[in-house]
Image: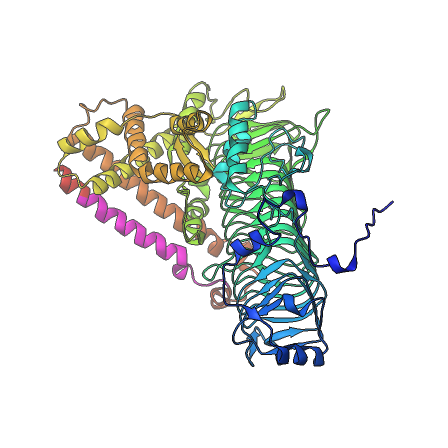
Amino acid sequence: MNNIVKHPIQELGYNFIDGPYIPKGKNEYYLRNQQNKSNQYRPLKVSEIEILIRNGNTSDDWGNIYVSKEFDPALVKNSKFLGLIRIGKLEPYYLEYHNLRMAVGIYNSTVISCDLGDNICIDNTNYLSHYIIGNEVLIANINEFATTNYSKFGNGILKDGEPEKVRIQIELRNENGGRSVIPFNDMLPGDAALWSDYPEDKMLQQRLTELTSASFPARRGYYGTVGDRCVIKDCNIIKDVKIGSDAYIKGANKLKNLTINSDETSPSQIGEGCELVNGIVGVGCRIFYGVKAVRFILADHSQLKYGARLINSYLGSNSTISCCEVLNSLIYPGHEQHHNNSFLTAALVKGQSNIAAGATIGSNHNSRGADGEIIAGRGFWPGLCVNMKHNSRFASFTILVKGDYPHEMDISIPFSLVSNNIPKNRLVIIPGYWFRYNMYALARNAWKYHQRDHRINPVQKIEYDYLAPDTVNELFAAIALLKKIKPDEYGNGTLPGLENSKRPTEIKDVQLSLALFHELIVYYGITNLMQFIAIKKTKSLEEFKRQIKRESRREEWVNLGGQLMPAQSEKALRKSITSGKIHSWKEVHDFYRKCGNRYDIEKAGHAFASLLEIENLTTRQLDKKKIKELFTRTLATREWMAKGVYESRAKDYTNPFRKMVYHSEEQMDAVIGKLEDNPFIQVEKKQLATFKRQLKKTEKILGL
């Protein structure tokens, strides 16, 4: 039976906060007055009340309506006012946005206990309750627009008197909730990673909960807010939603318990048919056309489109999901998944990823419970119609060829192409595939995510380069594995432990892969050595050795939300949180900033140590002759990469099966553009020229 409670009619619009939750000496408006400190309001004049009544307006108490000096009662018609109402100036203008033209004023609406800003336009809003509306806001055709006294605006907190069972949590990475996190506004992917990585650390879990609770007041009675210049039209239900300035919301079915961040530099938009419940939306986000999202965080400058479903998931910044379903996943920045029939569940995807049409990642349970997980390093790219099982793990920049993968996998060799060879009944891996056959896509991947990073104030420094401490450490581990293989006459071999089966895993071109990985580490070492010398303004080889000696070590690194840092730094962060040295999420975020500020130097130290290790050298042995040799090899590698970028793209212009749909070269150029005019090809040429200049400059500094 529905619990319908009767109250005296005169209480409608009042008693927003229950008596026990109002502090002594305060009234129900004390928090509202803190949120809106304006003192511009005055009581209505008798003549203004007469005009309002004549225009078809009603109020339970005209003495509870306060207005600004520039209030024009002629601009309020056919509306009902209940409770304490405060209205800013209303002037005889109309406001226009995208061909929506609305007269300033309040028309055909019911307004309950609200503060309304200057020159607002409100029309046909059936129920507007307990909101503070900014200046020059347009609101039209809304069925319900209300705030409850216990609203949390998407944050996983508890209000006074609430039991733990009502707390909202996001069940990341695992469908049984074993890695649940408590969402909060401004939660970064590093925060979600830190929280979900250590469920066994009860003290850490407790402290993270305390940091979150301390970030938001538990008091009841906060009003919903709508920032300046928002446009909100043709929506059904908007309940317990905090909206930043300049947001554009049109045609949404249901928005409930949300914070929608938006500002004048990065406005957010929500479009037709969307239903969003229990979530946080970052600045600059776009959510359109039938999206369903529940218990979610959408980080800054990301998009959900065309019927996408995002449930119990965190989507990192500068990402796009459309036409598909994502459940129980933690996704770092730079993710693309935009095909109608792809599916991702119970996964940690570490960014720069692309999930193709028909890919079902983790959709088939292969245990007695919904407790499987997938971990994919940066650059994860499962191809068309890939079907794979929990539990699986993938090194950075793994490509999976179309097919059904019948067993769990642990692919520890980075930059690999993985395929399921059905006729031979074996898993086949081509190490270093990207560098050998698709250098254009690999290099463009790093470039495009730099270009697409629209964060105005990035707290976490995100690494997009394909050669970085995480991938280079994976290269060292892969070299150790490849050295165990005895290649056959064709250069191939088998390696156990990469698949949960008795069938062989074939590794292609073992010796070639070893040589490639060796040179990639040398290239990584020299390029970062050059950057270090530029940062430190080094004057000689001897000075360089003194400067780098302190920083030089190849240690374990972690990818914490797309930000790379030494594992010891992440461990120190956890210790500072559990010990109480860190008292707030702001201090956690300050830690990220400090790590980001050190990153280039620490990366250079890692690169230098990697160079010495792969070449089996000591610092003393690294004399001018040896460095000159390494510089020559590095230049050759860089030129080979540039050539690979060009040639891997040129295949699309010379392949007769690609050319056959065009009746001439001119038509092909008109449709896809000339190869030489390709924007990234041009960028690559400039980057190669810049690299050569920097190399020569560094050689001169070192006296080579």
Q: Which residues are drawn in magenta?
A: 672-697
Residue in front for this viewpoint, 360 or 586: 586
Quadrant including the C terminus: top left
In the picture, residue 32 is in which quadrant? bottom right
Vertical comparison of 455 with 425: above or below: below
Q: Does residue 426 belong to the magenta stretch?
A: no
The reply to whether residue 510 is in sight is yes
As drawn, is 397 to the left or to the right of 152?
left
Residue 58 locus on image (x, y percent): 72, 72
Residue 440 locus on image (x, y percent): 43, 48
> Which residue lies at the image location 15% right of the left edge and 37% below the top edge?
702
Q: Does residue 683 belong to the magenta stretch?
A: yes
Residue 19 locus on image (x, y percent): 67, 46
The reply to whether residue 201 is in sight is no
> Which residue lies at the image location 38% right of the left edge and 26% below the top edge?
568
Vertical comparison of 645 with 488: above or below: below
Residue in front for this viewpoint, 317 or 151: 151
Residue in front for this viewpoint, 523 or 449: 449
Quadrant including the N terminus: top right
Q: Main secondary structure of the magenta part?
A: helix
